[in-house]
Image (cartoon, coloured by chain):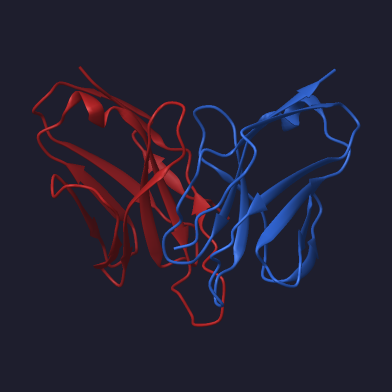
Chain colours: A blue, B red
């Protein structure tokens, strides 16, 4: 199973775009890349998932380069309510969670 | 469309006791995974059930066992509770794995277990 590496924490201001990059050098051919958001004492919330190139939905974009050894979650115009832990996951069947990235959005 | 539900929300037990946690998957899903999340850490995979059988298992002792029912709901059982079992237990559901497709898991709100 691919191991992921993310920054431990990030700070941003309201209205800014936030990009969180995840490294997954050992990603397998069949692996998808999935990002979750988690608030304290709640279950992780699915944000976005992709296999290659770029994926966009109503809340985020996911950029995946051709070699798929990394991915970047982009959150446009963050607000205070986006303060949470963000997890990057690679694989199927069972997810190996790392420590995630603690994003703090400041007013 | 109801998402993943878990019960109970909170639970307090003492060391040595046994506990059963329950999970109902999202409508249309047939696969259930269980995770343990200690305070300040990421969730750790316990096991996954598909077609009423354990398909994958993480690095957890046999004290942790599970079951999946014909309606796809699932139970997590933990025997001989230890203080270290205190955690948020998360259930996630997905649609049975199809080669070449993503196994997108949707999580429930969790059950907070406290062992005294």
Q: Quadrant of residue B68?
A: bottom left
Q: Residue at x 49, y 28 (%)?
A: A41
Q: Residue at x 59, y 62 (%)?
A: A25
Q: Where's residue A69, x and y in %?
A: 65, 64
Q: Where's residue A87, x and y in %?
A: 59, 45
Q: Nearer the viewer, residue A98 or B103?
A: A98
Q: Is residue B102 left or right of residue B45?
A: right
Q: Quadrant of residue B74?
A: bottom left
Q: Where's residue B21, x and y in %?
A: 27, 41
Of all residues, the one furthest to the front in this rendering is A25
Count the marks: 0
Of all residues, the one furthest to the bottom in this rendering is B99
Identify the image quadrant of the N terminus of chain B: bottom right
Residue B115, relative to residue A88: is it above or below?
A: above
Q: Where's residue A98, x and y in %?
A: 50, 44
Identify the image quadrant of the C terminus of chain B: top left
Residue A102, relative to residue A90: is it above or below?
A: above
Q: Is residue A7 left or right of residue B42?
A: right
Q: Residue at x 81, y 53 (%)?
A: A58
Q: Nearer the viewer, residue A18 or B32?
A: A18
Q: Is residue A21 left or right of residue B22?
A: right
Q: Is residue A16 left or right of residue B20?
A: right
């Amino acid at each position: 199973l691919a191991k992921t590496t993310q920054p431990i924490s990030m700070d941003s201001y309201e209205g800014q775009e936030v990009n969180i990059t995840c490294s997954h050098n050992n990603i397998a051919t069949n692996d998808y890349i999935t990002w979750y958001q988690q608030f304290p004492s709640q279950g992780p919330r699915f944000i976005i998932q992709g296999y290659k190139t770029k994926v966009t939905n109503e809340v985020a974009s996911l950029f995946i380069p051709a070699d798929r050894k990394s991915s970047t979650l982009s959150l446009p115009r963050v607000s205070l309510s986006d303060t949470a832990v963000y997890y990057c996951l690679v694989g199927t069947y069972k997810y190996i969670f790392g420590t995630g990235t603690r994003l703090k959005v400041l007013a | 469309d109801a998402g993943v539900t878990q019960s109970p929300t909170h639970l307090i037990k003492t060391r040595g006791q046994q506990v059963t946690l329950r999970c109902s998957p999202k409508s249309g899903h047939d696969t259930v995974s269980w995770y343990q999340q200690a305070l300040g850490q990421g969730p750790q995979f316990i096991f996954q059930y598909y077609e009423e059988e354990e398909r994958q298992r993480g690095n957890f002792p046999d004290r942790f066992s599970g079951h999946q029912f014909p309606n796809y709901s699932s139970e997590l059982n933990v025997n001989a509770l230890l203080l270290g079992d205190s955690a948020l237990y998360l259930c996630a559901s997905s649609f049975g794995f199809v080669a070449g497709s993503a196994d997108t898991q949707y999580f429930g709100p969790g059950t907070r277990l406290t062992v005294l």
